[in-house]
Each structure stands twice: as structure tokens, then as C-alpha cells.
Image (tube, rainbow, N blue to C red):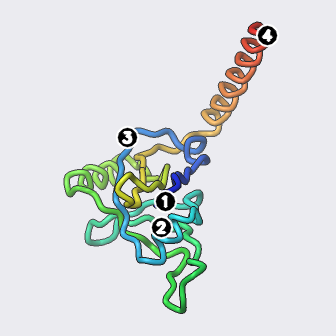
Amino acid sequence: MVQKNINIKNKKAKFEYEFIDTFVTGIVLAGTEIKSVREGKASITQSFCEFNERGELFVINMQIDEYSHASHFNHKPKAERKLLMNKRELTKLRKEVTTSGFTIVPINLFINDRGLAKLKIALAKGKKLYDKRETLKDRDNQRDLSRIKKSFNN
């Protein structure tokens, strides 16, 4: 069975946040959820991560559409889903979030070579409006430079 490459990105996160550190985590999914992810029917654009009372990390507001071939035993599209990490990493993240005011945002949802769903998350700091303008200006300058280089090469 040939498996197509699933790579669902959160493009808005790079514009809204400045990444401090990144982690790759496992994610607890039900049977219909993983089948839906393998079809590419998931979205992480509006999602964020939060700790519960017991110190477990959950991704909230992650959209996984209902599996098309399932019966009445289907999952909820916007349920909270638990993330799997080492205890050391969890305590480090929790300390950073509570003391420094950072947030944890999902960057990338993918299926690894063993067929397991993984979520790449980042410890991030929100950008101010002038930082966003700076990002846009840099992107425009890069685009102009690549156009000039292309015109000289032809």
C-alpha cells in the first residue's frame, strides 16, 4: 500500500508568532480520526495548546472532519486531543508558559514513516503590529530581489 505524504501546516502561525523553541509530539487519536487525517481532512489554523489541571498538554480547536465511511460511531470534529511528550519537556513548557507568558501553537500535523500522526508545536511569543509589518516588508524585498535575479539570468 502506497501512502501519500500528509503534511498539514499552520501558515498563519509564522506570521502571528515568533517561535522560541519547537517540539515534535505524538497525538492521541481515535480510529475514525486517524483515518480522516490520512485523507488530509484536518485543519490546525485556529488551534492552540493548553495544560489541564493534571499537567497534561491538550490541543484545542483542532478541526478533524468526520470520516466519510464511518457509521454512527464517528468522532466530534473539534474535540480536545491529548499530546504525548516526555515529562521533562512538559514541565519545561509549563514553566515557560506560566512565567514568561509564552503560548504553545501547533505548526505542522504530519504522518511519520511508521504511519503515526505527529504534531509539531512551538513555544511562541506573539508579534506586535510593527513586527508583522517588518515581516511583510522583508517578504516583499525578497520577492523583488528574486525577480531582479531572474531577469538578469535570462
- Where is residue 88 shown, x and y percent of the image? 20, 52
- Where is residue 145 shown, x and y percent of the image? 71, 16
**Residue 142: which quarter of the image?**
top right
Residues marked 3 and 1 touching at CB (< 8 Å): no
Q: Is residue 14 rendered to the left or right of residue 99?
A: right
Q: Which residue is mark 1?
A: 48
- Mark 4 residue type: Asn
**Distance from label 2 to label 3 (Cα)?**
20 Å
Identify the residue shown where x is 26% and y is 49%. Answer: 92
Q: Which residue is mark 4?
A: 154
Query: Mark 3 falls on what kind of element?
Result: strand
- Within 10 Å of the Cα at label 2, are there few (<14), some (14-19), or many (20+) other Cα atoms? some
- Within 10 Å of the Cα at label 1, are there few (<14), some (14-19), or many (20+) other Cα atoms? some
Between circles 4 and 3, the one closer to the viewer is: 4
Q: Earlier in the sequence, mark 4 or mark 2?
A: 2
- Within 10 Å of the Cα at label 4, are there few (<14), some (14-19), or many (20+) other Cα atoms? few
Q: Which residue is mark 3?
A: 21
Q: Earlier in the sequence, mark 4 or mark 3?
A: 3
Query: Mark 2 falls on what kind of element?
Result: strand
Instruction: Give the number of marks.
Output: 4
Residues marked 4 and 2 touching at CB (< 8 Å): no
Q: Does 41 appear above or below 139?
A: below
Identify the residue shown where x is 27% and y is 66%. Answer: 55
